[in-house]
Amino acid sequence: MDEKKNIQNKFVSITQNIGYEFRTTLKLSLKYLKEIFRSKLFFIIAILLPAILMIFMGVIFGGPISAVQSFSILVVNEDAGYTNDTITYTFGESLIGTLETITYPVEEGEEPMNLFYVYESEYYNQSVEDYLIYEEHGLHLTLIIPENFSEMIFSFDNDITVTVVGDSTTGDYQSAVTAFGSIYDDFVGAVRLSLGDTTGHTIIVENFIDIVGNTTVFDLMVPGFVIIGIVMNIVFVSSILTEEYEQKTLEKLQLTPMRTIHLLGGLAISQLLVALVQIIVLFALSLAFGYNAIGSFVLAGIIIWIMSLSMSAIGMIIAAFSKKATIASSISSVVAIPLYMITFFPVWGMSTIPMFEINGNVFGVFDILPTNLATNMVNSVMIYGQTFADIQFEFVSLIIVTAIYLIIGLVLISLLKLRPKKE
Amino acid sequence: MVTSNENVILKSESVGDSDSAIEVVELIKHFSSKKESEAVKAVDGLSFSIKKGEIFGLLGPNGAGKTTLIRMLVGLLKPTSGKFLFNGEELNINSSKLKNVIGYVPQEAAFWKDLTVYENLSTIGTTYKIPNKELKERIDHLLEGLYLVEHKKKKASKLSGGMQRRLNLAMGMVHHPQILLLDEVFVGLDPQTRNYLYDYLKDFASKDNKTIIITSHLMEIVDALSDRVGILDLGKMLAVDTPENLKNTHGKGDILQLEIDKDFDDSLVSKIDKSVADVSIEKNEQNLVVKTLNAIAKLPEILNIVEAEGFTVQDVKLTKQSLETVFISLTGKELRV
């Protein structure tokens, strides 16, 4: 009977202790949250700065990538031709022929490249365009040559009008229209000259449509901007911990039965909540500025959320070696810059040096940086629509890398900041 | 005559004494340096004990080793050697048992400036695993006792200096420690706040047999508050006794400090010693330090002798018999603030 009571008491005591452990961690996390959200600096650095950057880049790079060298053009030739002195002229076909033959030199000794890749269609409708967009990945412009095109060329003093259709918000469309306009001018000028007349103007009527699926530079930058916001949390964590040290509140906590895991656990939980706010705010802003994401925001959010823990861990490592908050935040800023730069490496196609390979999955040197892993994954999910199954290896790698950083942070803080000092 | 070089090392009579709250045994702390000449013996073989329920005043000039001793007792600093026992038990420096027994209020007020008074106390209280309801009661009691109730929702950074010090004290007491160590908590307080603290600490110690160790430059407070006083200098305990006994044993009346215009030798000291009755006299650099009862009455006679010997007295300082005179008598110097 006594033994039963003893076991019961022991169970109650263990449960109570676990409750106290959690309560301590949560209380400390609440303390950090209050301190963070009451700080104006936090709002400026963690939310406002990345948000302004996002808005700025959204405006500047909201257009698409215009690095293409050739334009894909769909031509709907409705030209009925024009008969003059028993000869029928089909200038619509001549224009298509001109577009197909225009080339430009690339490098000396190399074959010149076509400026336009022309796809022809007998009629125009949205489904034709959609088909080409998705099948060929990159239709830049649709040209509709009207039924009376040849007739217009013969009717001197008249303007000659064609219609183009495209997404005016994309830089490629604008470049394609410019290139086409110049060739169109030359073509009409040459034909008119051969007919003995130089009057009349070319007119291009533009019909704008929204093309879904075009990736813009901004789209590629969005994960980076969200991650930059989170990377800045290194500065917060290192400053908060060093400030605790500097202002002797860490010493005060050291005098209590609190353990390192309570302190850093509390700090990490608070940072997870901060990161959640940042992720929601920054993704919402990116959407407002035309982020064309086709993947899961939840999956992308979870990836960045896990990464935020590793940023907290890096902050802890820096705090372990710093005695002043100003020094800690300076070191953190210096550390944050390469982390942030590396975030964009995959975007610009820079390759990483492989460290090892597991089942065909390569772990690169840069993958020891959680920002690199996270950016790769978020881009894969948001731009290429990949699912969790496609990024499993990177996801597990991120968890392992984050855990390693956290353990290092925990051990260093415990040894260097929370042990009785020798001097 | 006790000179500053004479060290009185008090041995603990019985290690593991059940009446002792703290027993310090042969405690040593050396701060090493690359240059051997700069190495410091901050605490040099200390042994003494403090009884349960006692208020123990620790006096010493700057650099005497008071703060080093206290930081070792609370587990913030690792001793070079020696040990201490709490309630007769040798506890691990990191044990939560020790942390629950001891409360420490440091010299510099330390708190989270962006948290309110209540939040500061509640955060620190939670780390001691005090149940919520009990913690709330304790905080309310502390706020009331330290006149902070009206300010409990104020951010700590917005408090006045005196209030911040009271908050600092409350944070060290929220877990109801059996042993409370206070390091210079009276420094920089206005008289009103000083009186609050004085009364509060007296009251705190009188309940539940609590032990308080207090370091302060304010002799009159230590004198009035302490059951016993220890005088520490250069890492050694020079004397430990009740304030009354210390005054009777070491005080020997008033202290006259005469600053002489030029260097003098022992002949002047012996001349005064022979001519003036019931004085104890010593040379301390360019000062003559005279200890005697009713020093004012004997001052003209002493001045005459000094002038007759061809010296001029540039300054005279009289310190009436108090704990301070005991301190000067034992350490040969004034308590530097």
Image (cartoon, coloured by chain):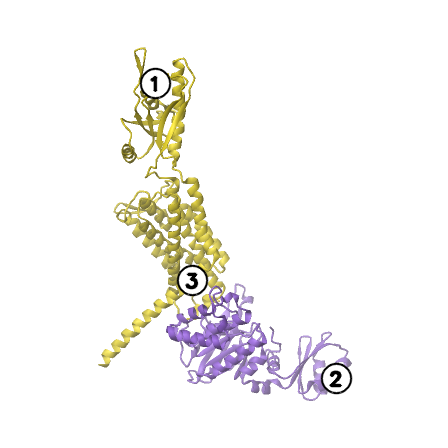
Chain colours: A yellow, B purple
Question: Could you say which disc has been placed on residue A357 in the image?
Answer: none
Q: Which residue is mark 1?
A: A151
User: Distance from label 1 to label 3 (Cα)?
Assistant: 77 Å
Instruction: State which mark lies toward you, 1 or 2.
Output: 1
Q: Which secondary structure, mark 2?
A: helix
- The answer to whether tags 3 and 2 share a subunit is no
Q: Is residue B290 above or below residue A258?
A: below
Who's the residue at 49% across and 54% down the image? A330
Q: Which secondary structure, mark 1?
A: helix
- The answer to whether tags 1 and 2 share a subunit is no
User: Distance from label 1 to label 2 (Cα)?
Assistant: 135 Å
Q: Which residue is mark 3?
A: A32
Residue A148 visible in the displayed image? yes
- The answer to whether tags 1 and 3 share a subunit is yes
* Place of residue B164 in the rendered image (x, y in percent of width and height, measured from the top left): 52, 70
Q: Chain of mark 1?
A: A
Q: Which secondary structure, mark 3?
A: helix
Question: Could you say which disc has been placed on residue B300 in the image?
Answer: 2
User: Distance from label 3 to label 2 (Cα)?
Assistant: 68 Å
* Place of residue B265 in the rendered image (x, y in percent of width and height, measured from the top left): 70, 78
Q: Chain of mark 2?
A: B
Left or right: B214, with B301 as reference point = left
Instruction: State which mark lies toward you, 1 or 3.
Output: 1
Of A351 and A24, the residue lying toward us? A24
